[in-house]
Amino acid sequence: MSHTLGARQAQKQKTRRALLDAALELLEGQSLSSLGLREVTRAAGVAPTAFYRHFRSTADLGVALVEEALGSLHPMIRTTVSAAGDSEERIARAVGLIAGHVDAYPAHVRFIARERHGGVRPVREAVREQLARFAGEVGEALAGDPVSAGWSEDDRLMLAQLYVDQMLVTASLFLEALEADADPRERERVTRLATRQLRLIGIGRRHWLDGPAGGGRSAP
Amino acid sequence: MSHTLGARQAQKQKTRRALLDAALELLEGQSLSSLGLREVTRAAGVAPTAFYRHFRSTADLGVALVEEALGSLHPMIRTTVSAAGDSEERIARAVGLIAGHVDAYPAHVRFIARERHGGVRPVREAVREQLARFAGEVGEALAGDPVSAGWSEDDRLMLAQLYVDQMLVTASLFLEALEADADPRERERVTRLATRQLRLIGIGRRHWLDGPAGGGRSAP
DNA sequence: CCATGCAGTCAACAACTGTTCTCCGGGAGG
DNA sequence: CCTCCCGGAGAACAGTTGTTGACTGCATGG
């Protein structure tokens, strides 16, 4: 295996990181579609032409950022959804995990929120693909949960997508609370809001198969 | 009143519209932060300097677009939420209304979805303000609904925000279905998904005050 | 009917952009 | 040890950008 990097490749990865970090920082104040190649290299401390040794274009760099920001999240998502415990405990843990992630990687979160509907097609599609994978994994984890027993796969995916979108909305709110003002009460407010929203969704989930108008229409 | 516009101001409004329309069209393929002043005037068929007669900057134009895209939606939102009828009927009407709006004003919808978390601060704040107004109005309408009787205002706002975010997510999905491929089955898929998600939220809403862990925590 | 105001034009500016070609230095494989 | 490879630097290119000042024509109000 190429387990140990040669001094040659080590330096390459170093400037690559410098480019990614510089881009991530610049993207706090603008969108990817306005990010200039020279702008990035200037902030990274390398010559403009060095950029081409790593990325074909800024859109290409954006795709790399998407995978860096979202790719490592899959195990965390899985374990969070299929964690044991009281419904209320699981909600609190999920919200806390989101808040902690936003604190740890604010630039990544902002980047995803911004470029999910941003102006660069390949990046949008990369985000969409990762989020679809998330939804699929959550739906799979839901299958092993007694609360969702007897649900059609279609219904499970429906709920999973709701969860994923809700996660993004909540992360975005935590981010705003983080950058707007150093008021910790705002963070608490978002926590309370997200918790109650997840609670309401959980209630709807528990009663999904109750009434006559419940999930009966899933097989037309 | 300046009820009837002079030929003087009429021409001004005409080029203003040309600028807004040109910008809206250009923004289908990029974000506002990369939209150039000259780019807009070129597409609108006027000299670059004419831009300054209407807007201070492209960010200023963006704010105007936000108010154009969202400002006229308030009455529609109010009447939709407080409409009469079966729960299932109201859901179907709401989803249909969203789909119709996306069909009628796709560029506006894309603009809002994109710039809600976009790279231009004043525009982000304008979107946030309008959405907060939406949430407030929905929460107010919820107060008159027997299903939400006895809810605290805090809880009503929590649900209203969930509804507003869900509306945006759904609109964004309809937009993707519209531009991706001309396949009408995708549109149907989104309709079914959004309907069931709203149904689940509605179920959670009806059982919000049921259990012991319901809304009791609203007064800590 | 005349003078004022104002929407829009034109030319010019310095600064910046992405991309190409050429070159250099030093790690890596023989 | 020698050679090749390749990450990075440098210079130059044609275009484009935002902003300025001075201008023109015409609708408008007195």
Image: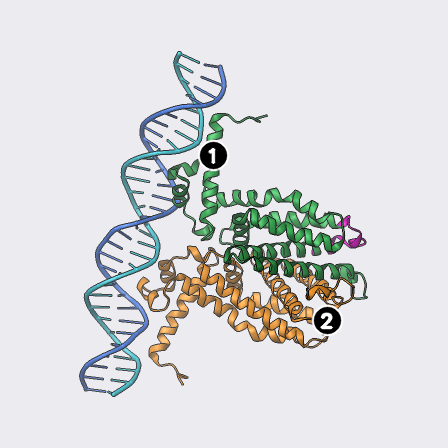
Chain colours: A green, B orange, C blue, D cyan
Mark 2 residue type: Ser
Dot in front, 2 or 1 = 1
Res A157 visible? no
Mark 1 nearby-residue class (10 Å; few <14, some 14–19, many ≥20): few
Total marks shown come to 2
Q: Residue B124's x, y, as percent? A: 49, 61
Element on which disc 1 rests = helix
Q: Chain of mark 2?
A: B
Same chain for marks 2 and 1? no
Q: Determine whether, in the image, residue B147 is placed left or right of residue A27.
A: right
Q: Residues within 10 Å of mark 2 (few under 14, many from 20)?
A: some
The image position of residue B163, as x and y in percent, is 64, 65
Q: Is residue A72 visible?
A: yes
Label annotation for residue B87: 2
What stretch of residues is rendered in magenta?
A: A143-158
* Quarter of the figure with residue B206: bottom right
* Residue B45, image x, y percentages: 35, 64
Locate residue A162 relative to residue B62 in the image: left or right. Answer: right
| Quadrant of the frame with the N terminus of chain B | bottom left
The residue carrying mark 1 is A14
Give the SS element for disc 2.
helix
Residue A172 quadrant: bottom right
x 67%, y 55%: residue: A163
What amino acid type should be assigned to the residue bearing mark 1?
Lys
- Image height of B62 relative to A22, above or below: below
Prevalent SS, magenta region: helix
At 40% from the left and 61% from the top, the residue drawn is: B58
